[in-house]
Amino acid sequence: MGEFDLIARYFTRPGRTEGGVVTHGIGDDCAVLTPTPGWQWLVSADMLVEGRHFLSTVAPRRLGHKALAVNLSDLAACGATPRAFFLSLAMPSANEDFLAGFSAGLFELADAHGIVLAGGDTTAGPLNINITVMGEAPPGTALLRSGARAGEDVWVSGTLGDARLALEVFRGSLSLPGEAFEAVRLAMELPQPRVALGQALRGIATAAIDVSDGLAGDLGHLLKRSNVGAELHLADLPRSSVLGAMPEAVQQLCLLTGGDDYELVFTAPADARARVLDAGRSTGTPVYRIGRIEEAAGLRVRDGHGRLLDQTLQSFDHFQS
Ligand code: ADP
Ligand code: MG
């Protein structure tokens, strides 16, 4: 199968390559996009490399989902409404089983969020998936990392740490009974980006980031950009019953440095608590208050006895592990 047949068969959907802001989609040298009058573009790109961002054991359908999910998560963190995306794909060969599964998972999630595949590039090479997403927001409403102020609350959506727990089982450093493993494996392979929550937090949250490399590291980025610090209590961090049944040290590792969570961590003034809870309720997203922003730089985490945890809380660094 040639490059053009492949694009036509797996990535072009009659009647669905145009819509919303996408005036002309796949098939021309450029896509033509018509923005919502007065709104701003929010654009992000994320690359997935086999062995680094996903394991060769993942089902193609889940991989298609995850490749788009991690990108939608960046739009969610900024409060953007998803509009269009571009897919650049390198593959060793045109394996039809892979392409059918991958595109099915990709489009299922795309349709759920009303985002249109408007173009891309396809080439032979080691498996590598690069997606660029484009979203929109009314002027000045994008959530940034830089708006947190001392005295504000720190919030997180969903639960943390399950994806890391699954990774440790794959690595053989932990084991879990079958059912528990399947549950955390879902968190790792089928993350659900918090797109609706992000949009609902426009005008409420003062700063936000999505947790892709672990809470400590990602919250750390937000704190740095905002020129503030924060204090959290380990006991307040939301976790699944599977993670909650693990030894304390494992919980701590997964909660703080886990990675691949794709939850939102955000800040808001204390007088906005009711509005934050409303945003969670109206979008069906659990949200939890986990700490407070302070003037002193850095992240301080207290254990169940109120003691400060060691400062070796490190973000998962792709070049160090
Ligand atoms: P060019 O050679 O001009 O860069 P291509 O021949 O690579 O264009 O692509 C033809 C059309 O197919 C373009 O509209 C491009 O955006 C689209 N396309 C190519 N690969 C993909 C893909 N993986 N997913 C979606 N659209 C794609
Ligand atoms: Mg090309």
Image (cartoon, rainbow, N blue to C red):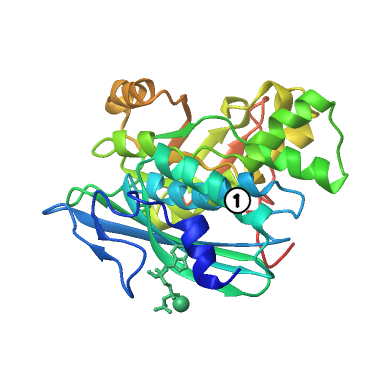
**Secondary structure beneath label 1:** helix
How far from the left and from the top, in percent, is residue 189? Answer: 65, 42
Please state, as top left, top right, bottom left or bottom right, where the C terminus lies in the image.
bottom right
Q: Going by the image, does 89 lie left or right of 283?
A: right
The reply to whether residue 38 is in sight is yes
The quadrant in which residue 317 appears is: bottom right
Given residues 4 and 81, the one toward you in this image is 4
Quadrant location of the N terminus in the rendered image: bottom right
| Mark 1: amino acid | Ala
Give the labeled residue for mark 1: 100
Q: Nearer the viewer, residue 157 or 220?
A: 157
Q: Does residue 154 lie above or below 179 as drawn?
A: below
On screen, residue 91 above or below 79: below
Looking at the image, which is closer to me, 151 or 45?
45
Of 71 and 99, which appears nearest the observer?
A: 99
Look at the picture and state if 242 lies above or below 218: above
Q: Position of residue 169 (x, y in %)?
A: 82, 40
Report x, y in % for residue 187. Answer: 63, 36
* Left or right: 174 as drawn, with respect to 181: right
